Image (tube, grey):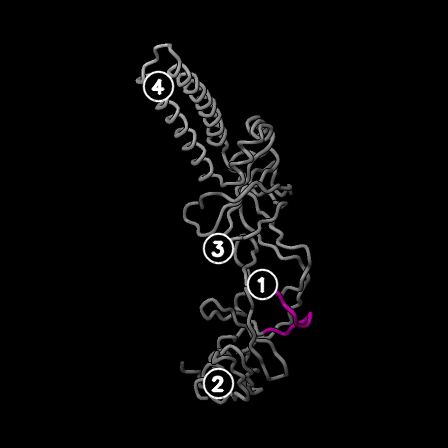
Amino acid sequence: MRLDRAFRGAAVLAVAAVAGRAHAGTVTLRAQDLQRRAVVVRDITAHRERPARYVYGRAVWLGPLVAAVGTIRADRAAAELDATMLTETRALYRAPYHISAQKLAQARARAAEARAKLASAVGVLRARYGERFAAALLSDRRLVARIGAGTVSVVEAMVPYPVLQHPPRIATARLDGGANVRGRTVTLRFLGVGGQVPSGMIGQSLYYLGPALQAGTMLRVDLRLGTRPRRTLRLPVSALIFDGRTAIAFRRIAPHRFRSFLMSKARPFYSGGHVAGFQSAWRGPARVPIVVQGAGLLWSLLARAVRRR
């Protein structure tokens, strides 16, 4: 990469390349280059917070869910009846009551058909709503009754990749939709991981039980991922250089010296519905002078020095 003439005299004093990578090193710039405001530094304060992900969710329409559970209950009752009829037919066939083998075969076929129909309905429910949520629907009649009566709602939280291995059992959400509920905060209880991902998204869907909400109500869901607070550093997008999946930033360590560092497992944070920057765990000082403009120049100088080694 060619550098602007104003910076060709910039001196790279030290480069500590780690494992052959160019993201670990120190760059020194002349004072006159800094005066041209090509590199802007801002003090950023790290803050303590519990690890969390903020995702969007919506209250789903529960008609298909209630109908599916009703169908399964009907299919289960039919399967039990056919199983009983098969047992009685088999007993009559073995006794001298002149039950033909054809009737016995018909009873067996009806019982097998009822079992297959029931298994298919249960499989569809599990595929749509996930193993845990489907099991709760099939075992907890009070839950289904509350959903059917509209006293509770089911919220589908859409989590982009990477997926959560252990979703929190309790989440909070801030309602975005509807003039009468906007800004209200509600508590959600985990139901299970969805069996399918919303169309157009790579990640997972999580189901939570919430208060009565109108279908389609949008929520901003706060998923707390731990109980211990940790120090977190939030950087604007302009401060970061992305090298594949790696996010790299620079901090000032002396008046004219800058050192690169990795933003380990950087994840986005939002403001006004848009990505405002990226954050990650931070083990350094609470107040950090970060290069918020000109990180690309420093990255180019660092990479150029590594190539010359």
| Residues at marks 3 and 2, CA–CA distance in whole angstroms | 40 Å
Q: Residue at x 34, y 24 (%)?
A: 109
Secondary structure of the residue carrying numbered label 1: strand
Percent across and percent down for residue 25 are 54, 81
| Residues at marks 2 and 4, CA–CA distance in whole angstroms | 92 Å
Total numbered badges shown on the rendered structure: 4
- Taking depth in this image into account, of 67 and 252 the one nearest to the observer is 67
Mark 1 — residue? 279
Mark 3 — residue? 161
Q: Residue at x 48, y 85 (%)?
A: 7
Mark 4 — residue? 104
Q: Amino acid at mark 3?
A: Tyr
Q: Earlier in the sequence, mark 1 or mark 3?
A: 3
Which region shows up in magenta?
280-290
Percent across and percent down for residue 99 are 35, 13
Q: Amino acid at mark 4?
A: Leu
Residue found at the very far left of the displayed protein: 102
Q: Nearer the viewer, mark 1 or mark 3?
A: 3
Q: Residue at x 43, y 83 (%)?
A: 3
Percent across and percent down for residue 221 are 58, 47
Q: Earlier in the sequence, mark 1 or mark 4?
A: 4
In magenta segment, residue 82: no
| Residues at marks 1 and 4, CA–CA distance in whole angstroms | 68 Å
Mark 2 — residue? 7
Q: Is the C-beta separation of discs 4 and 3 under 8 Å?
A: no
Q: Amino acid at mark 2?
A: Phe
Percent across and percent down for residue 255 are 63, 83
Q: Nearer the viewer, mark 3 or mark 2?
A: 3
